[in-house]
Image (spheres, rainbow, N blue to C red):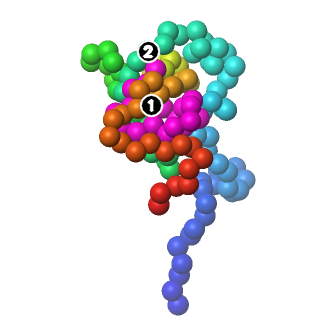
């Protein structure tokens, strides 16, 4: 008789044996605290270029305009405007510290300022191209 592997949806609580969801390490606009959002909104506007963005995964990365600066993570909830970012789009953004250690930053209030040439751009309401 063949056994089937356990297909539990997630880890189990060590106390009750019940399943639970682990909190996501990604800070979205919805889960960001008011004080963190306020602090980020007071930061200066910076410029960068989209290095990667995946609508299905819900995130991407921005290359900062400053030399030797690390890439910044950007969550889909922090993109403002009608177009989905693609590689090469020039953007403006503000930096926000990522809790709990607040040693890394992510891009928030991201606005596409110049669309990448010769690349088809889709609007958020357009159907997915699967």
**Above-or-below relation of 108 to 126:** above
Residue indicated by mark 1? 73
Q: Which residues are magenta?
A: 72-92
Q: CA distance from mark 2 to mark 1?
A: 14 Å
Q: Residue furthest left?
A: 68
Provide residue 96's location: percent of width, then percent of height.
53, 19
Provide residue 65's location: percent of width, then percent of height.
33, 18
Q: Which mark is residue 46?
A: 2
**Above-or-below relation of 33 to 19:** above
Residue 40 is at least partly visible in this image: yes
Q: Is residue 69 left or right of residue 30?
A: left
Q: Looking at the image, is mark 2 or mark 1 nearer the viewer?
A: 2
Q: Secondary structure at mark 2?
A: strand
Q: Assess whether mark 1 and mark 2 are in contact (beta carbons under 8 angstroms).
A: no
Q: Earlier in the sequence, mark 2 or mark 1?
A: 2
Q: Secondary structure at mark 1?
A: strand
Provide residue 1's location: percent of width, then percent of height.
53, 90
**Residue 19, quarter of picture:** bottom right
Q: Is residue 53 left or right of residue 36?
A: left
**Above-or-below relation of 89 to 44:** below
Q: Residue at x 48, y 32 (%)?
A: 74
Q: Residue at x 33, y 35 (%)?
A: 117
Q: Residue at x 71, y 56 (%)?
A: 18
Q: Residue furthest bottom?
A: 1
Q: Which mark is residue 111?
A: none
**Above-or-below relation of 70 to 1:** above
**Residue 24, quarter of picture:** top right
Nearer to us in this view, 85 or 44: 85
């Amino acid at each position: 008789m063949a056994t089937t592997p356990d297909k539990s949806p997630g880890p189990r609580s060590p106390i009750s044996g019940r399943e639970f969801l682990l909190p996501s390490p990604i800070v979205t606009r919805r889960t960001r605290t008011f004080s963190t959002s306020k602090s980020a909104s007071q930061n200066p506007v910076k410029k960068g270029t989209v290095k990667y963005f995946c609508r299905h995964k819900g995130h991407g990365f921005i290359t900062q305009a400053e030399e030797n600066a690390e890439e910044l993570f950007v969550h889909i909830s922090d993109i403002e405007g009608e177009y989905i970012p693609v590689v090469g789009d020039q953007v403006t953004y503000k930096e926000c510290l990522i809790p709990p250690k607040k040693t890394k930053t992510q891009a928030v209030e991201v606005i596409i300022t110049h669309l990448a040439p010769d690349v088809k751009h889709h609007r958020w309401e357009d159907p997915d191209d699967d």
